[in-house]
Image (spheres, helix red, strand yellow):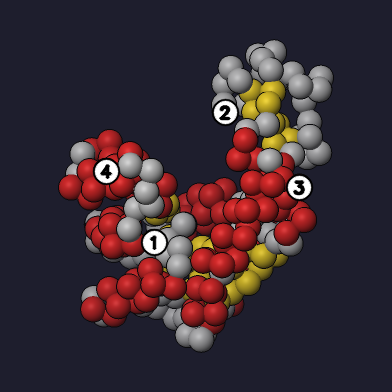
Amino acid sequence: MRIVLVGPPGAGKGTQAAYLAKNLSIPHISTGDLFRANISQGTDLGNQAKGYMDAGNLVPDEVTIAMALDRMGQPDAANGFLLDGFPRNVSQAEALDKALTAEGLHLDAVLDLEVDEDEVVKRIAGRRICRNDSSHVFHVTYSPPKEQGVCDECGGELYQRDDDSEKTVRTRLEVYHTQTEPIIDHYREQGLVVTISALGKVAEVTKRAMAALEEGGRAA
């Protein structure tokens, strides 16, 4: 299957993408991973992206699109892929449509993870990270530490990242609504959108998503 995964920040896209890709035996293609891989490998596209990023500028759509298309053309993606973080806007979605059509391919589904704004703020703003080890993550409501402000694993101080503040989260949501959410309507016109609730335990959401993909989407 060829799937695009969309949803607001805090919807759990990265987590669900990993589980779904494993269950469907297709590669999880994340924009963040693409950038890191191309930059670390010193590819032409990576060098272009790094130049924009070092200058404090956004990486142009054409560079992001070229990276994504290059990754989708690799052997492990021959039978499908799951895109996470791409396309990020309608122009990228149109470019993806054009590229797939040129190869005689098409998307099978666009999985829309739905979660209300207040829940997103609660999820992200409640995160606390250990200063000693960023892999130690807690949540003031869902997975609180035994002692407030102290990491259970190593005793390090827990803190809230600047980009996890409520103000920043609401700004990120506004960017999502303005730039990314319109791609849902773009794909809905093609009959590809499958919407599920992203509330509940990870396994429950994955099961819900797998069922929705089996029932919806377009036959390959």
| Residue type at the position of mark 2 | Ser
Foreground: disc 1 or disc 3: 3
Q: Quadrant of residue 212?
A: bottom right
Tell me the tag on residue 20.
none
| Residue type at the position of mark 1 | Phe
Q: Nearer the viewer, residue 186 or 179?
A: 179
Residue 29 placement (x, y as % from top left): 39, 54
The alpha-carbon separation of the residues under discs 4 and 1 comes to: 28 Å
Q: Quadrant of residue 144?
A: top right
Answer above or below: position of 37 versus 86: above
Q: What's the residue at 62%, 35% (across, down)?
A: 162
Q: Which residue is mark 1?
A: 81
Residue neighbourhood size for the residue with mark 3, other residues' Cα within 10 Å, grouped as few (<14), some (14–19), many (≥20): some
Q: What's the residue at 65%, 49% (across, down)?
A: 169
**Labels 1 and 3 touching (C-beta < 8 A):** no
Mark closer to the chain start, 3 or 2: 3
Foreground: disc 3 or disc 4: 4
Q: Which residue is mark 2?
A: 135
Q: Which residue is mark 4?
A: 51
Residue neighbourhood size for the residue with mark 4, other residues' Cα within 10 Å, grouped as few (<14), some (14–19), many (≥20): some
Q: Is residue 156 left or right of residue 65?
A: right
Residue neighbourhood size for the residue with mark 1, other residues' Cα within 10 Å, grouped as few (<14), some (14–19), many (≥20): many
Answer above or below: position of 95 versus 127: below
Tell me the tag on residue 122.
3
**Labels 2 and 4 touching (C-beta < 8 A):** no
Foreground: disc 3 or disc 2: 3
